[in-house]
Image (spheres, rainbow, N blue to C red):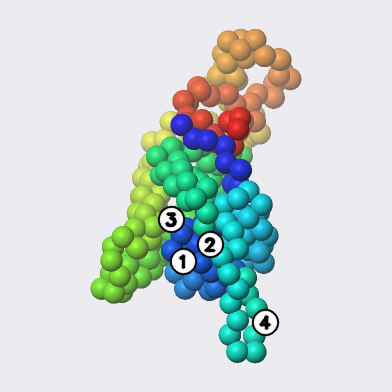
Amino acid sequence: MATRRKLSNPLALAVMVLLGERPMHPYEIARVLRQRGKEHSIKINYGSLYTVVQNLEKHGFVEVAGVQRQGNRPERTLYGLTDAGRTETHDWLADLVAVPAKEYPAFEVALSLIAALHPDEAMELLTERAAAQEVQAAALRGVLAKLGAELPRLFLVETEYQAHMLEAEAAWIRALLDELTSGGLPGLDEWRSWHDTGQTPDDWERFEEQFRDADAGPASVPGTGPAPGTGPRPATPTAPDPEDRPA
């Protein structure tokens, strides 16, 4: 079961993992993150790195481990991981690995509202997206082929995951496009009619009424029907969101 953490910025976790290797100053932390390409997996604002380190120190997860001076350069404060930081690093990472968190990807948002687009336009846009994803996946496969000869696979699994996710989504979109092109997608005729005529299909009206009666919710304006993508749908069990859990 996920626990609400004192810090939720993934950059803080990345910093603690690096400091678990050896003490570093913030500039070196930024350099190593770039060197290892972590910006492809973690949303990193390097300008806020010092603030992240300060917050980690405030919560007792890191501490000053010394001062480094090289030549005429200004002194740099080295930070190291505390015992509390090691525990937090382990527990936080374990939560991320084991507990599926409910996320809200932008594409999922778009799919939930896609009926607001004309089906012909939606098909064009989905085709464009799938093609872009296939290009991105191919590029990642190229990176994997190159780096696979130089690095242990352990350090490439995140890139493998990214490539697989792109390929899986592109394949799903292609399958959906096949249904749209063939006319086999249930509800396609009603979807097209709604845009072509401006009239809400009777099936959509009945669907809305059934759920409105079941939920005893407020009545909608007669004749308007549900807005595409906003109608009720069966509840789907999901893993608890760690951000909604009390500390």
- Which mark is first along the chain, 1 or 2? 1
Q: For the residue marked with disc 2, what is the amino acid?
A: Gly
Which of these two is toward me, 180 or 232? 232
Establish if 101 lies above or below 23.
above
* Residue at mark 4 to residue at mark 1: CA–CA distance: 21 Å
Q: Position of residue 172 (x, y in %)?
A: 38, 46
Instruction: Determine whether label 2 and label 3 are within 8 Å by CB.
Output: no
Q: For the residue marked with disc 4, what is the amino acid?
A: Pro
Instruction: Determine whether label 2 and label 1 are within 8 Å by CB.
Output: yes
Establish if 93 lies above or below 195.
below
Q: Residue furthest right?
A: 221
Q: Position of residue 177 (x, y in %)?
A: 41, 46
The image quarter containing residue 131 is bottom left
Question: Which residue is drawn at the image coordinates 67% and 82% (left, top)?
Answer: 74
Give the left or right position of residue 183, taking residue 195 as reference: left
Pointer 4: residues within 10 angstroms few (<14), some, or many (20+)? few
* Residue at mark 4 to residue at mark 2: CA–CA distance: 19 Å
- Mark 1 element type: loop
Q: For the residue marked with disc 3, what is the amino acid?
A: Ala
Which of these two is toward me, 48 or 62? 62
Q: Label for residue 74?
A: 4
* Residue at mark 2 to residue at mark 1: CA–CA distance: 7 Å
Q: Is residue 20 visible?
A: yes
| Residue highlighted by disc 2 | 80
Total of numbered circles in the picture?
4
Pointer 2: residues within 10 angstroms few (<14), some, or many (20+)? many
- Which mark is first along the chain, 3 or 4? 4
| Residue highlighted by disc 1 | 22
- Which mark is first along the chain, 1 or 3? 1
Question: Which residue is drawn at the image coordinates 36% and 50% (left, top)?
Answer: 168
| Residue highlighted by disc 3 | 130
Instruction: Determine whether label 4 and label 2 are within 8 Å by CB.
Output: no
